Amino acid sequence: MTYKNTFIFSIVLMIIGFMIVIQIRSIQSPREFRETRDMWEIRTQLQAEQERLQQLQYELNTLINIENNYHESTEQEQIQTLNDSIEELERKSGLTELTDEGVVIELKPNNRLVAEAREHPELTPELLNRLINELNTYGATDISVENERLINHTPIRYVSGKTYMNSRPLPSLPIEIKILSENPERLMNYLEVSQSRDEFRMNNMEFNVRVEEVTIPSYHSDIRLDLLQYNQGTEAGDS
């Protein structure tokens, strides 16, 4: 195996491993919010988290198998393995546009309640973060908010009276959130009785959910990999 191929493969492994670590940390350290769930909701969330951990373990085992197969392959097969790994990495990193059956959440003002309150509702970072936490718990694999792709380290902040996502301001309501999942119907059923749905209603917003074909755009900003380090001790010819 040439030094160039070793270097490229090491970079691919580090990036994939970095993504898995971020996903595990996001499960172990979810955003905090006031606990108001009943036992049924807690059991449901626990089951969903266990399924996510099983999926992460599967991905880790797949990565180990890729590495083992790589070292046992010919140079041409190694190049193909690298290309396949890069394509999969781009998809999981949000760099690829995806189209499939998914769930659409439409958020818009509840005109009757807005007229009574005399205040136009807004999508705050707190509400959006809570919804994203629930979506991840219920099996979402890819999410976009008004064509802004959500990735593991997407910042969601409140700046000068506006909610920013990926350093871009989100528009005023109505807003569409598109989600891909392995089981869109089940995800929609979860959302129909979710805590987030009630919270949006309490904030004078309608929370409408439907299943249809959706397109999740690719992530357009730069991805920073400051936490990655390449071990320069690898010598050419090592395998």
Image: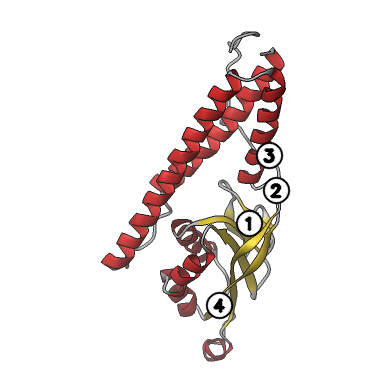
Q: Which residue is mark 4?
A: 208
Tell me the SS state at disc 4: strand
Mark 1 vs mark 3: give the one in front: 3
Say above or below: 88 vs 238.
Answer: below
Residue at which label 1 appears: 165
Image disc number at residue 96: 2
Residue 185: give x, y in percent of width and height.
51, 68
Give amino acid for label 4. Asn
Whether residue 79 sits left or right of residue 180 in the image: it is: right
SS under mark 3: helix
- Quarter of the picture containing the N terminus is top right
Q: Earlier in the sequence, mark 4 or mark 3?
A: 3
Can residue 230 be seen here? The reply is: no
Q: Disc 4 to disc 2, how far (Cα)?
A: 27 Å
Type of amino acid at the residue the image marks with label 2:
Thr
Dot 3 alpha-carbon crowd within 10 angstroms: few under 14, some 14 to 19, many 20 or more: some
Q: Which label's residue is closer to the chain start, 3 or 2?
A: 3
Q: CA distance from mark 1 to mark 4?
A: 22 Å
Picture coordinates of residue 23, whole percent (x, y): 48, 43
x then y, percent, for residue 57: 43, 39
Question: In terms of secondary structure, where does tag 2 sit?
Answer: loop
Q: Position of residue 207 (x, y in %)?
A: 53, 77
